[in-house]
Image (cartoon, rainbow, N blue to C red):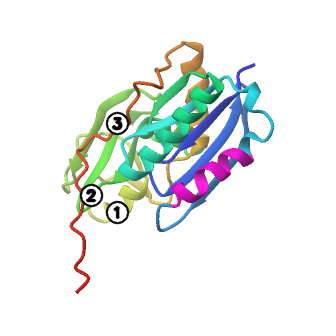
């Protein structure tokens, strides 16, 4: 029996889950208008693991794309646990596990478009079909009205990036779920398959998948 701790920190949803092959055992998550990962992530991890740290088989991390700050905090926590407990690291695409969870919770669509807000009219997105095949790899896309009109069929667009596209995208059969956020729950749907295939990564060399270079904002004048 494999016991996996999943950590999702790519957006403002700070989410941690414990699962085995039969499904979810425990899920703790907190969503805020600001990033609370530095204050809350380790507390949630402790609450989820309890006294079962020695029973863990692996740590799963949502590798991005997403927030630079959130991904760095999640990566640091995951690496620390891997080194301390001598565990392998599973790195999962944030967009892929969003789509996996959406297919389970909202079946019946021909396509699934997870979107993470990348500011202005840009989103991090990828396209998946109803069986989970990747039709368009992760990209930082400046959304246009006709961006997804080539998809013939029903489309579910989900994530905080979907909110700013609703009423703008002109696809005739597109539904929007802007409240759907990346969750460790979705990660648990993929993590055990990855572990069984031994497709883990070396914690010492793992880096998050930022997709875009980090650009620091200019500090505001105090005068």
**Cα–Cα gap, marks 3 and 1:** 27 Å
> Few, some or many C-alpha atoms within 10 Å of disc 3 (few <14, some 14-19, many ≥20)?
some
Q: Which element type, helix, strand or loop, lies under badge 2?
A: loop
* Extent of the magenta region: 36-47
Task: Examine the structure image and report whether residue 44 is included in the region drawn in magenta.
Answer: yes
Disc with the residue nearer the chain's start (3 vs 1): 1
Q: Residue at x 50, y 43 (%)?
A: 74
Disc 2 + disc 1, Cβ < 8 Å: yes
Main SS, magenta region, reads helix
In-image side of 118 versus 98 (left or right): left
Write down the residue under mark 2.
169
> Among all residues in the image, which is located at the extreme bottom?
223
Residue 104 seen in the figure: no
Find out whether the residues at labels 3 and 1 contact each other: C-beta distance under 8 Å.
Answer: no
Q: Which residue is mark 1?
A: 166
Image x and y of residue 121, in percent: 23, 60
For the N terminus, the quadrant is top right
For label 1, the SS is loop
Q: Residue 61 magenta-drawn?
A: no
Residue that label 3 marks: 209
């Amino acid at each position: 029996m494999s016991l996996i701790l999943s950590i999702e920190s790519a957006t403002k949803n700070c989410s941690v889950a414990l699962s085995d092959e039969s499904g979810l055992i425990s899920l703790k998550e907190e969503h805020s208008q600001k990033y609370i990962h530095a204050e809350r992530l380790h507390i949630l991890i402790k609450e989820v693991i309890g006294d079962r740290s020695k029973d863990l088989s692996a740590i799963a991390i949502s590798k991005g794309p997403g927030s630079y700050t959130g991904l760095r905090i999640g990566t640091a926590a995951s690496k620390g646990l891997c080194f301390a407990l001598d565990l392998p690291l599973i790195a999962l695409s944030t967009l892929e596990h969003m789509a996996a969870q959406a297919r389970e919770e909202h079946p019946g669509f021909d396509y699934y478009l997870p979107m993470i807000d990348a500011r202005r009219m840009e989103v991090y997105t990828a396209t998946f079909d109803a069986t989970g095949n990747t039709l368009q790899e992760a990209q930082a896309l400046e959304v246009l009205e006709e961006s997804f009109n080539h998809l013939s069929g029903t489309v579910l667009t989900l994530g905080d990036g979907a909110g700013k596209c609703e009423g703008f995208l002109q696809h005739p059969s597109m539904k929007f779920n802007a409240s759907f956020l990346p969750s460790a729950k979705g990660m648990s749907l993929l993590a055990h398959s990855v572990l069984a295939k031994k497709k883990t990564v070396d914690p010492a060399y793992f880096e998050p998948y930022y997709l875009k270079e980090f650009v620091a904002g200019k500090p505001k004048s105090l005068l």
